[in-house]
Amino acid sequence: MQTKFLRAISIQIVVPLIVLAMPMFYIGISIVANFYNQVLNNLITIIVSTHGLASTFVMLIIHEPYWKYCRTLFAGIGTKVSANKVVIIVSITNRETPQAGRQT
């Protein structure tokens, strides 16, 4: 039990480090070399912003209680659910009201 937990925590620590390693490497090189490229800066910003998403997916996949819950949560997607449906039809009619000075 503890070895599974240790393995899960290790993976949960390593994945964000891998996601953040490339941006940190680029930032270090660009500071030392006094290099500026707006396209690469934007790409690095996008990669760093996916850090939280990657960490969340790893947590949901690695820890058993989380993936069991997600499996039950998404188990109903794609299946046809038959239920009684109630349809309410509202009809609004536009009645003309007699205008002043106009005879009907």
Image (cartoon, helix red, strand yellow):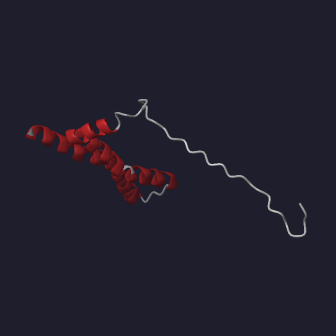
Residue 22 drawn at (x, y percent): 35, 47
- The count of marks equals 0
Res 96 seen here? yes
- Residue 4: image quadrant is top left
Horizontal side, residue 43 vs residue 90: left or right: left
Of all residues shown, which one is farthest toward the bottom? 100
Residue 59 drawn at (x, y percent): 26, 44
Residue 87 drawn at (x, y percent): 54, 41
Q: What residue is drawn where x is 45% and y is 36%?
A: 84
Q: Quadrant of the C terminus?
A: bottom right
Horizontal side, residue 22 vs residue 12: left or right: right
Residue 9 drawn at (x, y percent): 18, 45
Residues 12 and 17: in front is 12
- Residue 83: image quadrant is top left
Residues 63 and 38: in front is 63
Horizontal side, residue 57 vs residue 86: left or right: left
Q: What residue is drawn where x is 35% and y is 37%?
A: 74
Of all residues shown, which one is farthest toward the top? 79
Q: Is residue 80 above or below residue 89?
A: above
Residues 28 and 99: in front is 99
Q: What residue is drawn where x is 62% and y is 48%?
A: 90
Q: What residue is drawn where x is 19% and y is 41%?
A: 8
Horizontal side, residue 102 vs residue 16: left or right: right
Q: Is residue 76 above or below residue 92?
A: above
Res 22 seen here? no
